[in-house]
Image: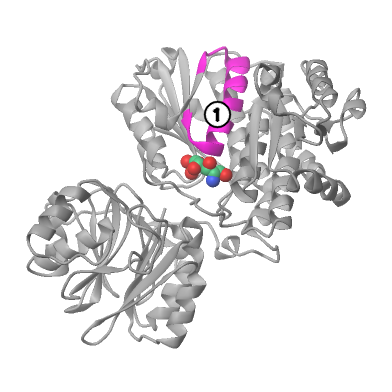
Amino acid sequence: MCGIIGYVGADEVVPVLLDGLRRLEYRGYDSAGMAVMGADEIGILRAAGKLKNLEQKAYHEPLHGTAGVGHTRWATHGAPTEANAHPQTDAEGLVAVVHNGIVENYVSLRKELQEAGVDLQSDTDTELIAQLLGREKGTLTERVLGILPRLEGQYAVVAVYRTEPDVVVAFRNGPPLVVGFGEGENMVASDITALLHRTRRVVFLENGDVAEVRADSVRILDPSGLEVERPVETLDWDAARVEKGGYRHFMLKEIFEQPDAIRNTVLAYLDAERRGVNLDGLGFSAEELSGLRRVHLVACGTSWHACLVGKFVIEELTGLPTEVDYASEYRYRQPLIGGDVLVVGVTQSGETADTLAAMEMAREGGALLATVCNSRGSSSWRLATSRMLTQAGPEIGVASTKAFTTQLVALVLMALALRSVRGLTDATDVELVAELQRLPLAVEQALAIDPELYRDGTEMLADATDSLYLGRGILYPIALEGALKLKEISYLHAEGYPAGEMKHGPIALLQEGFPVVAVAPEGATREKLIGNLMEVRARGAAVLAVSDGDAGGLDHVADLVLPVPRVHPLLQPVVAVVPLQLLAYHVAVELGNDVDQPRNLAKSVTVE
Ligand code: AGP
């Protein structure tokens, strides 16, 4: 939720921290701050609102030092004010702390500190960590080890200590932290996007790790203080991929990156002849797979929509009964988990708290555990036995686009792999693999829709306060996704619905000009959908349809048609979502919204 950066090296730290925060701002952006290690005091700057407010402060109140920490916040405890911004300090100003996550024993710790006479300056749980550290004895690392047993909940923390100006200490339990190894400098951050322009050599900290970071060394300890080894990984993402590259917004760039992202995801999992998949039993043994009877797909938000599509794909291609759950629901119900279930956590970030908790539960229940994830080395990546990496590259826009379409593709590839281990492979597989390879071209065509049509579509939606998105069958989840995209970045209310359900309630909303967006490609249910749209028109509502090939009867019922190419029905969701992403984008731009950092949202939801 929040973004954290820490640096120790030879460079002036303020520009390094601001640069890192700029790259992390997508994680949270309601306030920001930094702590800079001076010769004999810690300089603190904090500002409510976007990072640019902190940048201005840093310009007017310059701080100097070569070590420090920075933070960009997504508020949990306390309003997004300057007082609640991070870093938080202890009463003496001895330590400064930045934090991502939630301290769950906040109430009891707060009471204890207040009863001990501590005058708390903020409403945050973060200040409690700083106050606890301030009251401990010893070096910063010793202090951290001392307070670890006192903290309950999910946290990633980076701290500095006035009398050790050349050390930054990071510790985590839940939200991610990654240490970057540079030349004469070392760093720590919430994610690799903040480090890529300085180094590609990283260590992903494990839960319970305490990293003591100096310019020339990094020591990683377990909670008992014993030194532990963690593998140093070399990343293959390059820094240019986290720049806008001439596009007005990251989201627009990412929408247009979809053909490449899909191509890379497909090619990563095809065999040498490119006629079948090469997933080697998804990494499970033949014995484990022989008992497989069911599939559970768990995720949140857009990734959950990918799972809804995945259910159609997996059931049709493998015959395995497939359930889809919101991870936040799955973890609190009693799903029937066992060795005959494959549980797949689908997550762009690999750090979504609910998805991770659902995956943990599946592992404890003895399920085969897999993840479809866009972040190698993330928590879901490390938790799962079987991993499929979506090759979307870094996704910075908070509204997910290329991560979603590559998840759809990965789930098709996973279904093909399951067919192969179940001995079901036949001509269907060869056909689908060929279609998968043609898919990037089809997405390119979908991206090339006449801009004039978007202008008309934008007008229809931007002038309304509500809209309804309809789809049937495998495209019903795309209606949900289209509505979510519009809500997230335009702040207009939109509801996705299976078209057949419309007359059981939402039809009451319809009146003159009410916009209805229909995902209506050719296929088994199109006639039915056209019937639903006639009902819409009969009530004076306006219809915008996404359609493939020949508009068929649609031109009689739709005011506007956004044409997409026809592809294999199991891949149609990938193509059909593209105009809905662009439509949401254009509406948000028209309304003057912050497309990449929409209000109240954060890219990676690391709290429950
Ligand atoms: C997508 O546009 C959203 N920002 C959000 O719904 C997201 O998909 C969800 O929070 C899940 O994230 P994950 O894929 O990183 O687990």
In the foreground, 189 or 26: 26
- Alpha-carbon neighbours of circle 1 within 10 Å: few (<14), some, or many (≥20)? many
The residue depicted at 74 percent of the width and 35 percent of the height is: 576
Based on the picture, tell me whether residue 319 belongs to the magenta stretch.
yes
**Placement of 3 over or under 70, stated as above or below:** above
Indicate the position of residue 544 as horizontal and vertical percent values.
Answer: 81, 35
**Placement of 566 over or under 21, stated as above or below:** above
In the foreground, 31 or 15: 31
The residue depicted at 18 percent of the width and 50 percent of the height is: 151
Left or right: 93 with respect to 299?
Answer: left
Left or right: 218 with respect to 462?
Answer: left
Indicate the position of residue 2 as horizontal and vertical percent values.
Answer: 40, 57
Based on the picture, tell me whether residue 352 belongs to the magenta stretch.
no
Q: Give the range drawn in magenta.
A: 298-322
State whether residue 146 appears in this view: no
Identify the main secondary structure in magenta.
helix
- Image quadrant where residue 443 sits: top right
Per the image, the residue denoted by label 1 is 307
Indicate the position of residue 301 as horizontal and vertical percent values.
Answer: 52, 37
Indicate the position of residue 229 as horizontal and vertical percent values.
Answer: 24, 54
- Of helix, strand and loop, which one carries label 1? helix
- Image quadrant where residue 362 sits: top left
**Placement of 132 over or under 270, stated as above or below:** below
* Kind of residue at badge 1: Cys
Check mark 1 vs ligand 1: CB closer than 8 Å? yes or no.
no
